[in-house]
Image: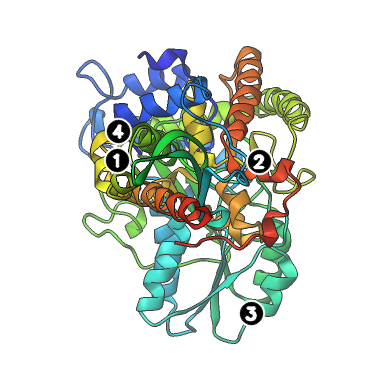
Amino acid sequence: MSTRSTIYLDYASTTPVDPRVASKMMEFLTPDGQFGNPASRSHRFGWKADEAVEEARSHVANLVNCDPREIVWTSGATEADNLAIKGVARFYKSKGNHIITSKIEHKAVLDPCRQLEREGFEVTYLDPNDKGVIDPEDVKSAIKDTTILISIMHINNELGTVNNISKIGEIAREKGIFFHVDAAQSTGKTLIDLEKMQIDLMSFSAHKTYGPKGIGALYVRRKPRVRLEALIHGGGHERGMRSGTLATHQIVGMGEAFRIAKEEMDTDHKKVSEFHQKFLEKVKKIDHVYINGDLDNKVPNILNVSFNFVEGESLIMGLKDIAVSSGSACTSASLEPSYVLRALGRKDELAHSSIRFSFGRFTSDEDVENTLDILGNVVHRLRELSPLWEMHLDGVDLDKVEWNLH
Amino acid sequence: MAYSKKVVEKFENTLNNPEAFNVGRFDPKESNVGTGMVGAPACGDVMKLQIKCEPKGNTHVIKDVKFKTYGCGSAIASSSELVDMLIGKTLEEAKAIKNIEIVKALELPPIKIHCSVLAEDSIRQAIEDYEAKQ
């Protein structure tokens, strides 16, 4: 079956590369293009590639209002998170061994923290409130004399909720603690001003913002200076923080994607806001639907919904011509319900019933309308199949049933 | 999360044509009906299986089956597959059905074997309930 008949509503997982970005990338691959190694100082091929890399660096810096010299290329947001967290913790370990993060972080933050625990660091994992937001006051009260790093995500990838990173930054700076933010979901969705915000490290990904996969960046503040222990050695590229020949075409792709993101942020935002509004209005008409996250404090491109009495994986299977996620795509190989929804205090069955819809630049009105039609129909039919729905209609309180756990 | 073609087919057929695939309910109070319900919402799957039987010689035969399942596509397909196996069987034959038969019929991957175990548990419970009434 052609994938073109499938409606794509999984932009928070990855976006297609904008055709304008792809054509720009093509200029840096073939013999007639600028294929040189940006580290080659002795000829034109190298100089041209280096120019392109630096231009891309400026585009990335421009989007988040920082100095281009503060941008370090990585293979993606996962590597940027690893470099920030392990790099800072290992460099400053003589100053302290305590790290603060949250339970709703992406695995790219949680797993490096687990690794640091094995190396003798102590990590505090904060709970979100019931809307999926980290309270800055909780961060403040978790701080100890030994705290060296705070890592809190900007926009949650499952819920789209937005943390107050300005406030957390103030708290961290006042105490002289480094603050890292995973902003993989933020670029092109909401304004980031690193000149104003007191943030020391920030991770970016290209492929969530219409750039290619396999490239990302870490912002590393110069004043006050943040130092890192590198994870990858070999050649001293990126001022020793990340060795390895720079992938010119990928970098150019990320630069172009971020340039467009800045230019078109308002149009993109307006478009997805309309989809969000329409989707929300219609989806609420289905009985026993719960919106996960905070409608007053989230980005409109992500909408996470629980359809009670229907299991999420079967719903995804029923929506076979619509590409959506049940919780994080990274956890769908396991049978565990979303750890993010569980952290909100949602009942497990509602976590099992959750679907994340995410819209983007190439979503059409038709996509949204067709999805809503199919969705209502499939939810209805799965409920006809569901013993829980039947019990609910019979007036049984499912919380009082003694289940046959197996 | 690649499903076998058989799981997808069974799931879709059941979803699109529930009555033909024995989705529904019997009155659990009827003396010739046995009901089994296994699993829990918090675990992500609940199966309810009902058998309607009649005596035949010195045993009983399953004449009709109804089910409802909350769970992933494999859980729904497993219940539906089990139903096909049950109709016309004596209780002894039904008790002898093993989950591995469902695994084979649907080509379930290891991560989904518990769906077939749940299906096996549901028929055992339904038979116990039926036998307790006789």
Q: Position of residue B45 (x, y in %)?
A: 50, 49
Q: Is mark 2 on a helix, strand or loop?
A: helix
Name the disc covering residue A389, or none.
2
Q: Which mark is residue B102?
A: 1
Q: Nearer the viewer, mark 4 or mark 3?
A: 3
Quadrant showing the N terminus of chain B:
top left
Q: Are marks 1 and 4 in contact (CB under 8 Å)?
A: no
**How far apart are the two marked residues, 4 and 2, measured between alpha carbons?**
66 Å
Mark 1–mark 2 Cα distance, whole angstroms, equals 26 Å
Amino acid carrying label 3: it is Ile
How far apart are the alpha carbons under marks 4 and 3?
Answer: 47 Å
Q: Which residue is drawn at 64% across and 57% down?
A: A347
Q: Which amino acid does label 4 sit on?
A: Trp
Chain assignment, label 3: A
Q: Foreground mark, 3 or 2?
A: 2
Q: Where residue A81 appears, x then y in whole percent?
A: 45, 57
Could you tell me which chain the residue with mark 2 belongs to? A
Q: Which residue is drawn at 39% across and 46% down?
A: B119
Whole-number angstrom distance, CA of label 1 to CA of label 4: 64 Å
Q: Earlier in the sequence, mark 4 or mark 3?
A: 4
Q: Badge 1 sits on which subunit?
A: B
Foreground pick, A263 / A314: A314
Q: What residue type is labelled 1?
A: Ile
Q: Against B46, is A98 above or below?
A: below
Q: Mark number for residue A143?
A: 3
* Number of other residues with Cα within 10 Å of mark 3, as a class: few under 14, some 14 to 19, many 20 or more: many
| Residue extending farthest front | B57
Give the CA distance from mark 1 to mark 3: 54 Å
Please indicate, yes or no, whether residue A203 appears anywhere in the rendered image.
Answer: yes
